[in-house]
Image (cartoon, grey):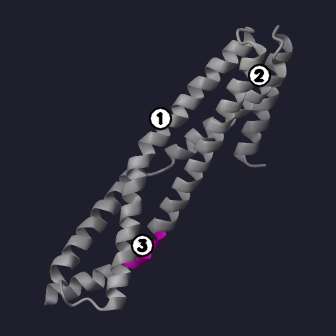
Amino acid sequence: MNKVSTALIAGLFFAFFLNSSCGTKYAREIANVDTLQVLISKSEADLKTVDTIKVANVYKKGQGNITLIQKNYKDTLTPEVAEFLSEYNSAIQALNTIRQQYPVLQKEIAFSKDQLKNIRHDLEYNILKEEQVKESYAKENDAVKKNMESLRVLMTVIKDKMELLGKDSIRINQMLQQARKN
């Protein structure tokens, strides 16, 4: 069993244990919120594994490479090289988008954590009306799903683009060496 499954089971067990002892009429809903809290905490932990410094450095180096190549290969690009550079530049721009989206996703995850904490508190103390319970849970469930999907996309793009740029770095270095000879 992996760490995520163990944490999820432990979280659910803990939630069930707490709920069985508190005097709320929303025990099932609290357990559902606790599950969302485990999921959003996992997302937060996964987001923290992103090496933002490495992403920023690869982006800056790639931008510099593109600039050098554009200066040194102005009119001598074959269609094949032009296509390669276009794909390389697209990968570099994708990393720039990641750099911009990372803090946004970080804030959204933190906001979801706070919202879930507040909803759980309100459920525990029977503060919410019954119609608000379903609405609040549905809204936060959607937010958690959205955040998890955004994180999945972000991680996939980083992995794919970093691998592509790693493979392309050999060709880029050869082009830069050739440019220096000219």
Labels 1 and 2 touching (C-beta < 8 A): no
Whichever of labels 3 and 1 marks the residue nearer the N terminus, that label is 1
Tag 3 near tag 1, CB within 8 Å: no
How packed mark 1 is, by other alpha carbons closer than 10 Å (few <14, some 14-19, many 20 or more), is few
Looking at the picture, does residue 125 appear above or below residue 31?
above
Q: CA distance from mark 3 to mark 2?
A: 46 Å
Residue type (three-letter) at the residue carrying disc 1:
Lys
Element at badge 3?
helix
Prevailing secondary structure class for the magenta stretch in the rendered image: helix
Question: In screen coordinates, is 150 left or right of 182?
Answer: right
* Kind of residue sitting beneath label 3: Gly
- Residue 54 visible in the displayed image: no
Q: Which residue is mark 3?
A: 166
Q: Amino acid at mark 2?
A: Ile
Above or below, 176 relative to 138: below
Q: Which residues are magenta?
A: 163-169
Name the residue located 56 percent from the left edge and 49 percent from the top edge: 151
Residue on which disc 1 sits:
107
- The local crowd at label 3, few if under 14, some if 14 to 19, many if 20 or more residues have their Cα within 10 Å, is few
Residue 90's image quarter? bottom left
Front one among 173 and 113: 113
Find disc 2 in the rendering and name its residue.
Answer: 30
